[in-house]
Amino acid sequence: MSRSATYLDYNATAPIRPEAREAVLRAFDLAGNPSSVHASGRKARDLVEAARAQVGDLVGVVAGSVTFVSGGTEADALAIASAKAAGVSRIIVCAGEHDAVVESAAAGGLPILTLPIDGEGVADLAWLEEALKADGRALVCLMLANNETGVIQPVAEASALVRAADGLLHVDAVQAAGKIAIDFTALGADTMALSAHKIGGPQGVGALVSGTRATVVRQQHGGGQERGRRAGTENVAGIAGFGAAAQAAARDLPSMANQGTWRDALAQRVKAVGAVVLGEGAPRLPQTLCLAADGFASQIQVMNLDLAGVMVSAGSACSSGKVKASRVVEAMGRSDLAPFALRVSGGWASTEQDWISCGDAWLAAYSRIGARRREVA
């Protein structure tokens, strides 16, 4: 990425942190398999276990609660499969969930109910309370923070309802980690998904955090790695980078709040010309802005900003490069704005100037598009 480029697509992937890069390179210098008992193997094992503790610290759990996997998607899939093995007979999935949860739930073969969200993107807990009264133990999937809007869900309140009904709660915290403080126990989650590359670690590694009410049932068979929860030789370098990124993210949490001021300044600029900020009335991640301007298609916004050296996304980045109307915005009751939604997301290396540059580029593009539409009219 050139120095002149403005990167505000952290919710897709954060640039790797220097601490994580160094940890990965150090791990590459080790020859040992972490399952080997000789000296090199023990050194590799030490790296894995140190990282396990660092990731656990980020969300307030002991190291033994952390199972390393290939990323957030696998963590979601493993949590849902484990809940099914534990005897849940139905799954309640929040309407704003990431496709990793939606698709894994659909593949499980159990009945699925959709937990609605309101116009701000917040889960309807009154609906959930009634749904939990039906027969059959339920798994509820409720993400901590939405990847498109940044809206933070009332997870602790939902957990109280789920536990009263003897259900299980899975929380996808992939976007929330490193951006807001997370206390796994206080949230009342049974399982939680995390991903390294969202917090400045390497791609291809994540974790499933599990509480005392959850039993992780392995889906990948072979050796006894990850305490029998996931077979296969651990990705030592990736895990070491994940641990270093988690430690740095926890350290940098206080400064992340600054992004809220920069985000809100950009929001005011785009609202002044008629754009709508989605989820503005709900608690949100400090570095995520979802905006929509009627008639200014998402893909046109992304392309115009890219030409101006500003990198952002239209909705989730996990759709094989395709830009399509936001399912999350549609679930918020704003189908009229779904084709026009744009996501701007900062992170650990973002600056106030990045947000200003994004606003400059967006307003210039919006002005050009408006002028062309007036010419056609």
Image (spheres, grey):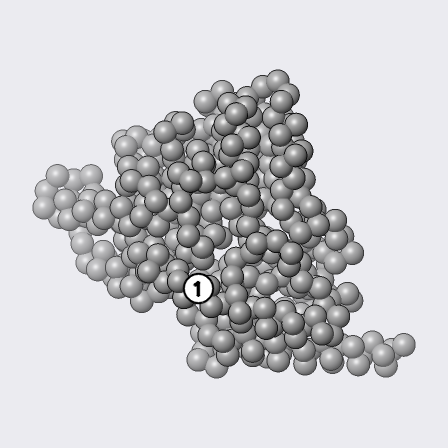
Q: How many marks?
A: 1
- Classify the position of the N terminus by image quarter: bottom left
Q: Is residue 98 visible?
A: yes
Within-10-Å neighbours for mark 1: few <14, some 14–19, many 20+: many
- Please report the residue visible at 49 percent of the width from the left and 62 percent of the height from the top: 10
**Left or right: where 195 falls relative to 103:** left
Instruction: Relative to 326, say whether 344 is above or below.
Output: below
Residue 238: image x %, image y %? 32, 53
Residue 74 appears in the figure: no
Q: Nearer the viewer, residue 245 or 265?
A: 265
x and y percentages locating residue 159 in the rendered image: 51, 34
Considering every residue shown, the one lying at the far top of the view is 135
Q: Is residue 196 above or below residue 14?
A: above
Percent position (x, y) of residue 37?
12, 39
Residue in the image at 36% along x and 59% along y: 249
Where does residue 146 sit, x and y in percent of width and height? 56, 51
For this rendering, which residue is in front, 281 or 271?
Answer: 281
Give, as a three-letter code, the residue at label 1.
Met
Element under label 1?
helix
207 or 307: which is nearer to us? Answer: 207
Q: Residue furthest left?
A: 39
Image quarter for residue 142? top right
Q: Quadrant of residue 138?
A: top right
Which residue sits at x=71%, y=74%? 272
Q: Which residue is mark 1?
A: 256
Does 281 sit left or right of 1 as displayed? right
Q: Quadrant of the C terminus?
A: bottom right
Say left or right for 205 vs 341: left
Taking the spot 52% from the left edge, 25% from the top edge, the residue there is: 164
